[in-house]
Image (cartoon, helix red, strand yellow):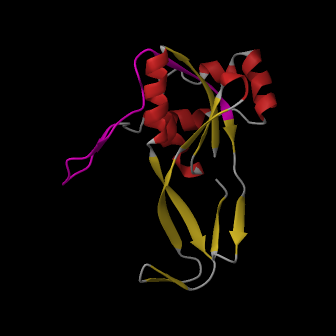
Amino acid sequence: MHLYFFLRGVYHQLEIMKTLLQGQFFCWKRKVLRKMKIEGKEFKKGDIIVSAVQGALRPTLFGAYEYVFPREALPDVLSILGIADNAGDFQKKKFRVFCLRKVFGCRKIPDKIFKQAQKINPIMIINGSNRALSTCVTGGVATHFIGIKDDKYQKWHDIGFEQEML
């Protein structure tokens, strides 16, 4: 999935937020197409393998950013970007955002996804560890969402997976 947005604010705070976003990892699910052995474990056709994949932040048109991550992680991504109750207002009430969605070839983020994101705690303490995961919200930075674009799913018979083409 691709999330398009603008960032604006204090330059060094923008750089910190971009670095934090690039350091996020998400679960990437792939469906096994044939019996195989990976790292000593047997998998049969139809099994789901979950791997960690890093979110990719790319600069794009007009100073906007594109963030690439697995589709299932959209509510989590919105949560770590600090979604507030009115976060969807920017993307649905302005004609210019409608036009930008057409330029970027994306669609509006559904309101139900914003509601799911509000229920996800962006800060996590990992039990039994001294590690924690935190939000990517940085003071002095505003995020203005444009929209999302889905990736296609494809069967890769040579490697044995059906997966989202990130």
Q: Position of residue 74 (x, y in %)?
A: 55, 43
Q: Position of residue 16 (x, y in %)?
A: 43, 27
Residue 111 lies in the magenta-colored region: no
What span is in magenta?
123-147
Identify the image quadrant of residue 59.
top right
Can I make out residue 82 in this image? no
Q: Position of residue 33 (x, y in %)?
A: 63, 78
Q: Is residue 163 above or below residue 57?
A: below
Compare residues 150 and 13 and report the one nearer the observer.
13
Q: Is residue 43 above or below residue 137?
A: below
Identify the image quadrant of residue 147.
top right
Residue at 73% from the left image edge and 35% from the top image edge: 107
Residue 127 lies in the magenta-colored region: yes
Residue at 63% from the left image edge and 77% from the top image edge: 160
Residue at 44% from the left image edge and 19% from the top image edge: 12
Can I make out residue 30 in this image? yes
Q: Position of residue 89 (x, y in %)?
A: 61, 19
Compare residues 54 and 88 and report the one nearer the observer.
54
Position of residue 48 in the picture relative to residue 159 (left or right):
left
Residue at 66% from the left image edge and 26% from the top image edge: 64
How many numbered markers are drawn? 0
Compare residues 19 and 43 and report the one nearer the observer.
19
